[in-house]
């Protein structure tokens, strides 16, 4: 097995051969959770490492002229139940995002708190497995900064997004609720944000208000809308159907790279 030092790989082969941005390298190099993931990957062959590192490359970004005049909405268009309707009625002033699980400092953040955190704006193409694409501009809090603030414990391998909507009204308990999960490579990706704005305005209800995930290197179903709670976990085997997401529990791939 050929294995090469992580630093050399990130600084040398990483940026030169794989086109990583320096910012992306720094981000990943600084984070303890990602360092741990990469440390585990040190035992992998160079071929296997090359499969992991290109995932830090950026998804294509577009110009304002490319924005779709009518971005499609899909899946849940408005969560049912009075709890969510009350949040909408009050312009989400009472809404809070909980960040917990395997973290040192659990967080509870309102929209004003999120707007005060490090942000990113990007114009990207959303690709749904059903065969349509739309281009939109998203502004949101960088997930990496929030996870650094909360402090991931070393055992954390995945970030789970728990949503407000029950997409399957026949499934029992948490099996009917929408949820998603990503690994730490995607969680610390430069373009992975929790968007509170779309095309320069507050995120509309049909697109996931008040907060939705943008994980630009993956297909549409990974982009959880109506995010209420974020949980760092070692494994997602104990959640709902155990496959890491609402659609994954129904046969979709967990890693939906594009
Ligand atoms: N909470 C939640 N998130 C979700 C869905 C959903 O039904 N509920 N649908 C997914 C699918 S399949 C797609 S294509 C996108 C659609 O996002 P949009 O409505 O903003 O186009 O959201 C994804 N995230
Ligand atoms: Mo989708």
Image (cartoon, rainbow, N blue to C red):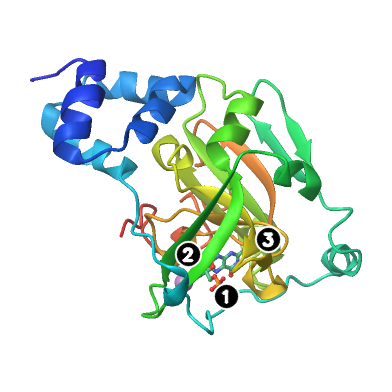
- Mark 2 residue's CB less than 8 Å from ligand 1: yes
Q: Earlier in the sequence, mark 2 or mark 3?
A: 2
Rendering coords of residue 235 (x, y %) = 49, 35
User: Which labelled disc corresponds to residue 109?
Assistant: none
Q: Earlier in the sequence, mark 2 or mark 1?
A: 1
- Mark 3 residue's CB less than 8 Å from ligand 1: yes
SS state under label 1: loop
| Cα separation between marks 2 and 1 | 9 Å
Decide if residue 44 is in sight here: no
SS state under label 2: helix
Residue where numbered disc 3 is placed: 226
| Cα separation between marks 1 and 3 | 12 Å
Residue at point 40%, 28% (across, down): 28
Q: Quadrant of the N terminus?
A: top left
Rendering coords of residue 152 (x, y %) = 57, 25
User: Which labelled disc corresponds to residue 75?
Assistant: 1
Judging depth in this view, the residue of 104 and 26 nearest the camera is: 26
On the image, which quarter does residue 77 sit in? bottom right
Residue at point 47%, 24% (across, down): 33
| Label 2 close to label 1 by CB (< 8 Å) | yes
Residue where numbered disc 2 is placed: 221
**Circle 2 Cα neighbour tier, 10 Å, few/some/many (<14 / 14–19 / ≥20):** many
């Amino acid at each position: 097995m050929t294995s090469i030092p992580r630093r050399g790989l990130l600084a040398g082969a990483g940026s030169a051969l794989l086109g990583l941005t320096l910012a992306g390298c720094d981000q990943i190099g600084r984070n303890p959770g990602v360092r741990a993931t990469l440390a585990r990957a040190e035992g992998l062959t160079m071929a296997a490492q090359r499969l992991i590192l290109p995932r830090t490359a950026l998804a294509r970004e577009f110009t304002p002229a490319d924005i779709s005049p009518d971005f499609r909405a899909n899946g849940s268009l408005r969560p049912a139940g009075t709890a969510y309707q009350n949040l909408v009625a009050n312009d989400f002033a009472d809404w809070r995002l909980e960040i917990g699980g395997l973290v040192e400092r659990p967080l509870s953040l309102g929209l004003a708190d999120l707007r005060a955190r490090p942000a990113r704006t990007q114009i990207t193409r959303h690709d749904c497995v059903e065969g349509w694409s739309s281009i939109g501009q998203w502004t949101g809090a960088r997930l990496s900064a929030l996870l650094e603030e909360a402090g991931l414990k070393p055992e954390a391998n995945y970030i789970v997004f728990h949503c407000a909507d029950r997409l399957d009204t026949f499934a029992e308990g948490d099996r009917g609720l929408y949820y998603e999960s990503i690994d730490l490579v995607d969680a610390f990706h430069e373009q992975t944000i929790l968007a509170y704005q779309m095309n320069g305005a507050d995120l509309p209800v049909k697109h996931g208000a008040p907060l939705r995930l943008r994980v630009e290197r993956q297909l549409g179903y990974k982009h959880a809308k109506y995010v209420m709670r974020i949980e760092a976990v070692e494994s997602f085997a104990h959640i709902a159907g155990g496959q890491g997401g609402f659609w994954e529990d129904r046969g979709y791939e967990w890693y939906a790279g594009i």
